[in-house]
Amino acid sequence: MLNNYDVVVVGAGHAGSEAAAAAANLGSKTLLITMDMTKIGQMSCNPAIGGIAKGQIVREIDALGGYTGIITDRSSIQFRMLNRSKGPAMWSPRAQCDRVKFSIEWRKELEKIKNLDFFQDKVSELIIENDAVCGVKTEMGFTFHSKAVVLTNGTFLNALIHIGKKQLEGGRMAETSSYGISDQLLKYNFTVSRLKTGTSARIDGRSIDFSEMVIQHGDEEPSFFSYLHADNEPVKQRPCHVARTSEEVHETLRRGFHESPLFTGVIQGVGPRYCPSIEDKVVTFSSKDSHQLFLEPEGFDTEEYYINGFSSSLPWEVQLEALRKVKGLENVKIFRPGYAIEYDYFDPTQLHHTLETKKLANLYFAGQINGTTGYEEAAAQGLIAGINAHQKVSNEPDFVLARDEAYIGVLIDDLVTKGVDEPYRMFTSRAEYRILLRQDNADIRLTPRAYNLGLVKKERFHLMQYKQESINRVISFFENESIKPSDINSFLKSIGSSEIKQGVKLISIISRPDINIFDLVSNYKPLQNLAHEFIRLRKDILQGAEISMKYKGYLVREKSIADKIKKLENAIIPNSINYDKYLSISTEARQKLNKIRPKTIGQAARIPGINPSDINVLLVSFGR
């Protein structure tokens, strides 16, 4: 261990782990400081990675050389591809994980990185000189100097746990809060506010009657997160189960509302609207007589279950009584009650797109400290912050992803441009270019950029090239191969698709909505021969080719729109601009432009409260 580093990362959750790995792998001498070395990459809430839009983010992290996808694949106990019934822009991979193994695998990977050191302690103070951060001080009295600091404090800053009327200091159950940094940054005019999140009770699987519940198996053919993972690799899986609340459950919960810190005004922080507590659901959706509960196993070698959908801060007795009214949970035993956490976060409009703060140089924020919720959103920010911390100390260009390049680009642009007034969660609806930003093509979109950066090795880059070349070859075959009625009509008739009356190009067949490429491979021999020419038949190659052919018109149109919008992104706004002199711009718009200081016209146009007429004034003033 040294006292001088290029980059110090504070916190070893999902954001901190990715940040430390990125900075160290790029060549920066990096120190990762955590309160508990046994909790690296800890899953504080449900034991799952991915989901709607979140799965796309994890694929992007993997394509950029991050670790979350690799760790997930190694520790998963169930894989599912969500939204299969919808178009490919909506497909989202999700995996249940072994919580303990997930953390162990993270530590294993981090300890392999030669430029990365570790230290167990709390950071209580930043070292600041001339409005620039140059190190940290810890609670035990250690000082570490560095050229950049990445804060990924999660839910630990001035954190308070609520269970009914009971209040405990801590960012997770049995883990203490962190103090000092919020108060210090307030002196530098940072805006600090409070948010609230929560988690569900953990229960004893031996006390569950699963016969009363609906079983939920994983996919027979898993869709792994990492592009390095081989298709069709056998994997052991464990099922989840689905239960439902009832009006009797809701009435039991209501009887405890007078002791709920959510309703008594004790909790001041705003909670996540898209992941509400069971109390919130009962009140907000009062007309519904039941809600789904997903019982998710915490691992292969444990009987502990997480109840997804039953986050609560009610007294533990009320939680237990209500759970025992659920069919199949009549005799349930609780390992740990659910609870709510209040914690400090910093308004993310105080950040550049690199995630460096505007008020203090060399200081980066990533994860829930920026007002986000979710492992995936945190990991993505950590990766970008770690990359940019290295770039800054190495005098290299900033690394920023645009909204048409990645969900990660959408996430960060939303944060720094719009800010948050509730915990931010990624959804597919937040992305304007969903067809371009699919989970299947993240490697094609992003791996070249990571390779040029030095974060991705040749083997991964060549694997991506092979995939792209193979997709192009399949498309070329479909465009040039003619097919006769006698070759295909029996198959078309068998699936209820209209028969052809004369020879056509094979691409006209795959363009039909009721035809998929895997059926064609099974029923058209020339295509089978092409498939066998690949070094190995990879599902993602055929799937990528099919999506490119079926949705070509949509892809071209969306790319055209993105290219037009980029013109606004290339219109740079001078740092010295004084918005107050533009009296034809509304007062609200001038105030927000002065606060956020957008770098481009495109970013300015996305600020809430900025109207097209305000943008036109700026464009005219710049001679556009």
Image (cartoon, rainbow, N blue to C red):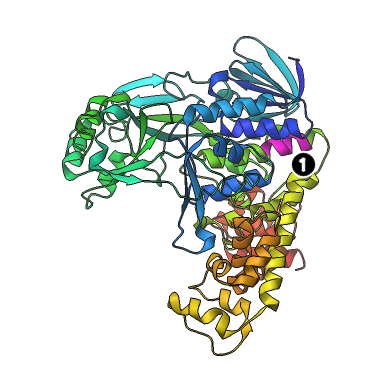
Residue 203 belongs to the span the image colors magenta: no
Q: What's the residue at 75%, 25% (across, down)? A: 114
Q: Nearer the viewer, residue 387 or 617?
A: 387
Up/down of 184 relative to 428, above or below: above
Question: Which residue is most to the right?
Answer: 395
Tell me where residue 344 appears, x and y as whole percent.
50, 30
Image quadrant in which you'd find residue 460:
top right
The amino acid beneath tag 1 is: Lys
Task: From the viewer's perspective, tell me whether residue 456 is left or right of residue 424.
Answer: right
Tell which residue pokes out farthest to the top in this image.
Answer: 141
Measured as percent of width and height from the top left, residue 477 is found at 69, 72
Q: Position of residue 378 (x, y in %)?
A: 56, 38
Q: Nearer the viewer, residue 221 or 269?
A: 221
Residue 448 visible at all: yes
Q: Which residue is mark 1?
A: 457
Q: Residues within 10 Å of mark 1 (few under 14, many from 20)?
A: few
Q: Report the number of discs.
A: 1
Q: Is residue 277 above or below residue 143?
A: below
> Against 517, is 298 above or below?
above
**Image quarter for residue 225?**
top right
Label 1 secondary element: loop
Residue at the bottom extreme, as displayed = 501
In x, y percent, where is residue 139? 59, 12
Quadrant in the picture for residue 486? bottom right
Predominant secondary structure in magenta? helix
Q: Which residues are magenta?
A: 385-391
